[in-house]
Each structure stands twice: as C-alpha cells, then as structure tokens.
Amino acid sequence: MLMPSGRDPGQLRQLAAGVAAGYRAAKFIDRSKPKTKAMKPDAHPDYHTVKVVMTDGTEFTTRTTWGKPGDTLHLDIDPKSHPAWTGGQQHLIDRGGRLSRFQKKFSGFLKK
C-alpha cells in the first residue's frame, strides 16, 4: 500500500532511520591499546651542531643536518653582504668564475 507521499511504509522507515540516505554509525577507536606499528629506525637524519663563518669573519654555532658534527660552514653570501638586504650597495664577489661566464655568454644579448 502506498502512502500519500507516494512511498511505501518500508521506505519511510528506512529514511527515518537514516539507512536509505547512506548514513552509517560512527566507529570509535580503542585508544587504550598501544599501536602495533612502530616508527622505522633511523628515519630521521642526524641533527648536530656546526660552526658557521659569515663573510665578515663572525662566527656562530647552529644545529643542522648539513655535514658532520663539528664541521665549519663558510658562507659566500650572507644577509650582511647580499644586495637584497643591503640595498644593492655592494657587489657580488665572483667566486669560481660563474659570474664572469654568465656575463661572457650573455654580453651581447640585449645590444643592437
């Protein structure tokens, strides 16, 4: 027998229970038991201290994953010498010929 809404009584009971709409009851996780999967050993890199030497010779110690414990990191460019922080007052130092190779390669690029 159809109801005035055009649905049979079984469909109305399912809609009322939330079954027909695809709803499911929440599943609760038992947190009293410890997890069975442990983290892989040696998943993280070694985190140690190194000495950093700035371009003006000042030094400080920091923690990093770079190099080995006790190594010294010499900076070619730092916030005290980079044009982005100094306002372009200083020129970049050509280390290893990269700047001169770039200038030689593209010297006539925009010239007419």
Image: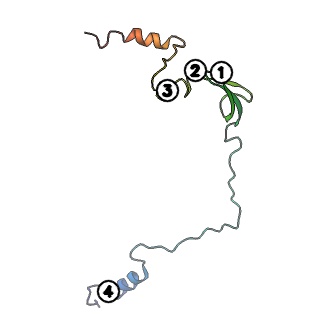
Q: CA distance from mark 2 to mark 1?
A: 11 Å
- Disc on res. 91: none
* Picture coordinates of residue 19, whole percent (x, y): 42, 77
Q: Is residue 35 left or right of residue 95?
A: right
Q: Are marks 3 and 1 in contact (CB under 8 Å)?
A: no
Q: Earlier in the sequence, mark 3 or mark 1?
A: 1
Please tell me whether residue 81 is drawn above or below residue 112 in the rendered image: below
Quadrant of the rendering where the N terminus is positioned:
bottom left
Q: Are marks 1 and 4 in contact (CB under 8 Å)?
A: no
Q: Name the residue that disc number 1 marks.
A: 57
* Picture coordinates of residue 101, whole percent (x, y): 45, 10
* Picture coordinates of residue 43, whole percent (x, y): 67, 42
Q: Name the residue that disc number 4 marks.
A: 8
Q: Amino acid at mark 4?
A: Asp
Q: Earlier in the sequence, mark 1 or mark 4?
A: 4
Q: Amino acid at mark 1?
A: Gly
Q: CA distance from mark 3 to mark 4?
A: 79 Å
Q: CA distance from mark 3 to mark 1?
A: 17 Å
Q: Name the residue that disc number 2 marks.
A: 76
Q: Amino acid at mark 3?
A: Thr
Q: Earlier in the sequence, mark 3 or mark 4?
A: 4
Helix, strand or loop under label 4: loop
- Disc on res. 86: 3
Its colouring scheme is rainbow
Q: CA distance from mark 2 to mark 4?
A: 80 Å
Q: Are marks 3 and 4 in contact (CB under 8 Å)?
A: no
Please tell me whether residue 62 is drawn above or below residue 99 in the rendered image: below
Q: Earlier in the sequence, mark 2 or mark 3?
A: 2
Helix, strand or loop under label 2: loop
Q: Residue at x 54, y 13 (%)?
A: 95
Q: Nearer the viewer, mark 2 or mark 4?
A: 2
